[in-house]
Image: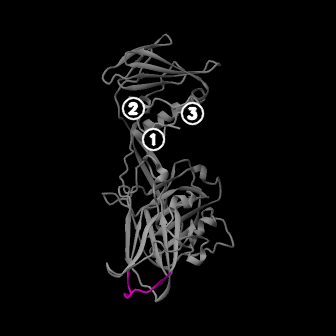
Amino acid sequence: INSCNGMRCGETFTGPNSPNKPALWTENWTSFYQVYGGQPYIRQPKYGHLKELHAAIKSCSTTLLQGVQRNFSLGPLQEGYAFEEENGECVAFLINNDKHNNVTVQFHNRSYELLPKSISILPDCENVTFNTANVQTTSNRRVINPRQISSIDNWVQFQDVIPNYDDTSLRSNSLLEQTNTTKDISDYLWYSLRFNYNLSCNEPTLVVRSAAHVAHALVNNKYIGAIHGNHDVNSFTLEFPVTVNEGTNNLSILSVMVGLPDSGAYLERRFAGLISVELQCTEEKSLNLTNSTWGYQVGLIGEQLEVYKGQNSTDIEWTQLGKNIMDQTLIWYKTIFDTPEGDDPVALDLSSMGKGEAWVNGQSIGRYWILFHDSNGKPSQSMYHVPRSFLKDKGMNILVLLEEGGGDPLGISLNFVSVTDLHGNFSKLSFPSSA
């Protein structure tokens, strides 16, 4: 099924390559930021303008989906689209492709003034409710009122289990591609290996080349460290000195993806996961582990136990917070909080955390990566919206976080967000009129 992948689909997309296929738009550049480590770029008036567009489309969605489409000319550079149902319901889009001039057109025996390079939406084929070139959104300021979400006594933690080779059931004598192995059911894939060490140096360097997004390394259940790549580099290399035992050792590497590739052809051919693993004493002396027999575990134990739902289970041993919170890795945190009164939007400030994911009453509110800073030394996002539909009408709500490392849950706050209108329009253009 072919699709339009861009921002000007109305002008560039010729339509599906078969009458039996739908017209698909697969890319919408309206996100808050593109990649972790990138700076946010959605601000007013763009957010408000798009919100009004979505409302206009939603108001006539039934007719758009069920009506019969017809196209017609309104002038040399003007055209129209109408969707009509048998019951008389009608939706029209009046388009002016002239980049410089206002144009008056006739439609249904009425005159409409179209702004340059714009589309007017008429949900009833009479009244214009939205024009793409007319920005009516007013300037505003967000007022954030934070409160601590929970005291230390209300927090508990669950340490995820680090698998060794003997704990795995999936085996291969090569490094498997991550996405095909996980089937996209988890961001996480454990690569585990039991090996005999016979090199002369006591503290070799572990060198891991990866085409994933993050890699955490553990040797004999001791955490060695982690490193991540970025959007513009296809692979990265983890290099840490490690202490190994004479004889048998266990190596566990957690490979992490943050979603799927975002663009390009033949995505199914993209390789993700570990590329090579070796222990190096010198350039001449090394132990290549790439083609050893590896064991695999898809996902974390906490995911399999559905820890994120926050329910009590005999398989999940919740304990009080540890003393060195910032040094803990691959750990789940849980607390409870009351439903805030009122109807103001609610957001969690996760700026004290590192990298992971957050759930409210079993519903994910998104991945977070606070430790990945942009060029100004700030995270791409630290405030995470909690839809009020996720919250209970009365009683306690459960917040669960999976923290990969470097986060302090005691710094999380629950924020109430109100908007103050500054009464300043971004556009002084007159609204397209009809006569």
Q: Amino acid at mark 2?
A: Val
- Which comes before the other along the chain, label 3 or label 1? 3
Left or right of 403: which side holds 209? left
Judged left or right of residue 339, residue 330 is left
- In the picture shown, does residue 304 fall above or below 144? below
Residue 199 drawn in magenta: yes
Give the numbered dot on residue 105: none
Identify the main secondary structure in magenta: loop
Q: Which mark is residue 21?
A: 3
Position in image of residue 121 (x %, y %): 48, 25
The residue mark sitting in front, 2 or 3, is 3
Which stretch is magenta?
Answer: 195-204
Q: Which residue is mark 1?
A: 28
Disc 2 to disc 3, how far (Cα)?
34 Å
Image quarter (top left, top right, bottom left or bottom right) of the C terminus: top left
Q: At 35% across and 52% down in the image, what residue appears?
A: 39
Q: How many marks?
A: 3
